Amino acid sequence: MSKAVNLGTLADDISVSNGSVSLATSEIILPKHSTDPSNPVEGQIYYNTTDGVVKFYKNSNWILIDTVADGSSASSAAISGNSIKNTVGSASGYYWIQTPSGPMQTYVDMSTIDGGGWTLIGKSGGGYWHGPDSWLKSSVGTMTNISSPGTNSYACIDSRAVAGTYALEVMISNFAMNLWVKSPIHTEATESTIFNHADGASAIENEATNNSQSVTATAWNGSTQSVYVNKYMIMAYLTHGGSTPAWAINAVGNTSINDYAMAVACCTTDHNGYTGGASNGRDAPYNSNDTGWPNDSYSTGHFYGLVWVR
């Protein structure tokens, strides 16, 4: 049975067995193009003769693979802030991160919080705002600073890949970055599940009831607490508005106060099967003066602070 080998020009000593390509003494010469090929497919690779670089097609973007992905430009966007820290050890600052929506620039903390390596994925300015279909899933607002986006407002990057594929932990912090609580991400979370309300409240509730994991939340002051996460990292309880990210006091998705189970509200009205009234699902600090940490109330306003993954 003959098989096509899409590797460009090959020299003589080549064999194909069970889908694997072997070269005895020869070299692979990649396809050459002066610009990115049209109609690319996932996994495609070629040599760009204009820039003298090798490029790889992944997550609907052409990615350079012959240079260090140090996040210094859109063309060298990294998969996460932690990958930048582990490969080039850069200082905290603004870096380019690969996302399903293309390279996006955001802040990476390399040393301030819990050893660093945190990628900033969202900011909430308190008050009340509605954005469940875009929160942490689209590029919204300005992420090239770590200041508040303003009362009744939020900003975020499309974090589905960096959070669902490359991260192990999610964290919320205040804007001063000296108060924070983190939780492990569910081990079965993926780019298609994390922060995704579109599957609907009933499906998320069922998944949480049957497949939540017990993990340990950790706070800035050394305190820890057993909490529950699901693969959506969404507060599953139907009347809690689908707050996300969230780690709850039980698999059902209940909340409490004065503890380290957290939930970041993202709506003010009903959506995707969730009840989203003005007092639903707020279980994270909301005061601009940083009083109320870790969470002295869940019914006064949206979270005031930053959301990170690592």
Image (cartoon, helix red, strand yellow):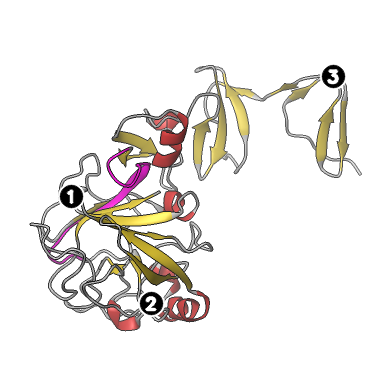
**Which circle marks residue 175 in the picture?**
1
Residue 117 is a magenta residue: yes
Name the mark nearer the viewer: 3 or 1: 1
User: Which label's residue is closer to the chain start, 3 or 1?
Assistant: 3
- Is the N terminus in the top left, top right, bottom left or bottom right quadrant? top right
Point out the tag, 2 or 1, that comes first from the N-terminus.
1
Whether residue 164 is visible to the viewer of this picture, yes or no, is yes
Q: Residue 215: x, y in percent?
A: 44, 67
Instruction: Read off the residue under disc 3.
Output: 25
Q: Secondary structure at mark 1?
A: loop
The quarter of the displayed image where residue 301 is located = bottom left
Residue 53 location (% of width, % of height): 54, 21
Q: Which residues are magenta?
A: 111-129
Inter-mark Cα distance, 2 to 3? 57 Å
Q: In front here: 85 or 188?
A: 85
Which mark identifies residue 109?
none
Alpha carbon distance from label 3 to label 1: 58 Å
**How far apart are the alpha carbons under marks 2 and 1?**
27 Å
Residue that label 2 marks: 236
